[in-house]
Image: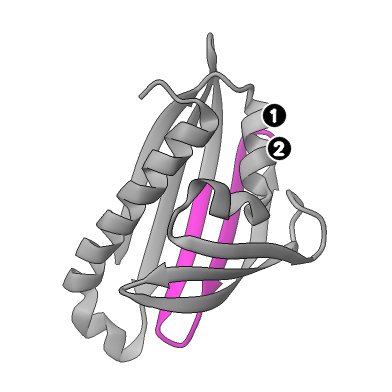
């Protein structure tokens, strides 16, 4: 399983950071790997909201449907997606600090079927993709680290 975890310190309040990231249609603003994302069902930040997402991975575009499966505003939001070759789960947690919020983004990609054979390669590729997204997240949230 490929995993990417990063924590950034933002001057935004937990509510501001949560509302921004729980609306996954904002993903193209902070994730350079995401070409587009739009909410197609439900309300952003609510369980059951669904997003059509186009992302680039391994030199090709993939269309995915992400669904918000857990919400504890303003502490946690979990989205999941997948296709015939992978299952994806993104968990974002928000911890108040004296100067704003500590945002932790934890993303997991679990290969299925024959894709399991390339898991070590997938893990390396996912790290590069995660690093780019983490940089965008830091910039968008005004993070100091």
For mark 2, does the 10 Å Cα neighbourhood hold few (<14), some (14 to 19), or many (20 or more) residues? some
- Magenta region: 73-91
Q: Secondary structure at mark 1?
A: helix
Q: How far apart are the alpha carbons under marks 1 and 2?
A: 7 Å
Q: Which residue is mark 1?
A: 15
Q: Secondary structure at mark 2?
A: loop
Residue located at (48% from left, 78% from top)? 62
Check if mark 1's residue and mark 2's residue have beta carbons within 8 Å.
yes
In the rendered image, residue 145, in percent from the top left (x then y), is placed at 35, 24
In the rendered image, residue 36, in percent from the top left (x then y), is placed at 59, 64
Residue located at (61% from left, 47% from top)? 77
The relative height of residue 134 versus residue 100 in the rendered view (above or below) is below
The relative height of residue 116 versus residue 138 in the rendered view (above or below) is below
Q: Is 15 on the left-hand or right-hand side of 133?
A: right
Q: Which mark is residue 67?
A: none
Residue located at (41% from left, 49% from top)? 133
């Amino acid at each position: 399983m490929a995993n990417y975890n990063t924590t950034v310190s933002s001057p935004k309040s937990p509510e501001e950071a949560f509302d921004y990231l729980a609306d996954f249609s904002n993903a193209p603003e902070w994730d350079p790997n995401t070409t587009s994302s739009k909410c197609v069902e439900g309300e952003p930040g609510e369980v059951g909201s669904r997003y059509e997402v186009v992302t680039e991975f391994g030199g090709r575009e993939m269309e995915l449907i992400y669904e918000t499966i857990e919400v504890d505003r303003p502490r946690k939001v979990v989205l999941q997606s997948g296709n015939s070759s992978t299952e994806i789960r993104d968990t974002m947690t928000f911890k108040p600090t004296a100067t704003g919020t500590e945002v932790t983004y934890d993303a997991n990609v679990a290969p299925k079927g024959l894709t399991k054979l390339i898991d070590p390669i997938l893990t390396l590729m996912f790290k590069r993709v995660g690093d780019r997204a983490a940089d965008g997240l830091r910039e968008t949230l005004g993070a100091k680290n």
